[in-house]
Image (cartoon, grey):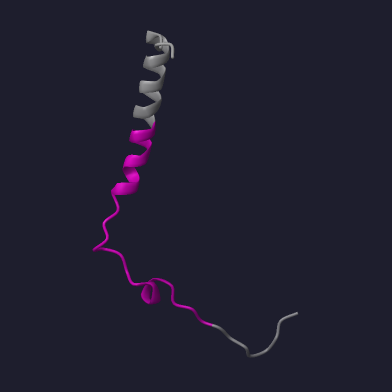
Amino acid sequence: MRPLSLGRMATRLMLCLGLLVAALPSFAQEVDGLLPVTQAYQLSADAGTPRC
């Protein structure tokens, strides 16, 4: 197995750091402030007169 050159190692390090920074917003969600599903999505339907 060949050792990685400095350029390839730096590229891989930057890629890993970029992926880490891109994933950080997914951990920023506040669970306590979320509504239950039944309150967040209230469904309604009207089967009165059909519209064609």
> Depth check: 34 or 51 in front?
34
Is 27 or 42 nearer to us in this picture?
Answer: 27
Q: Which of 31 and 51 is in front in this view?
A: 31
- Quick check: 50 above or below 3? below
**What is the span of residues highlighted in magenta in the rendered image?**
19-44
Instruction: State which quadrant residue 12 falls in.
Output: top left
Quick one: which residue is furthest to the front in this view?
1
**Residue lying at 36% horizontally and 40% vertically, measured from the top left:** 23
Figure quadrant of the N terminus: top left
As for residue 24 lying within the magenta part, the answer is yes
Above or below for 50 versus 33: below
Is residue 34 within the magenta segment? yes
> In the rendered view, does 28 fall on the left or right side of 44?
left
Q: Quadrant of residue 50?
A: bottom right
Q: Which residue lies furthest to the left in this view?
A: 32
Q: Is residue 35 left or right of residue 50?
A: left
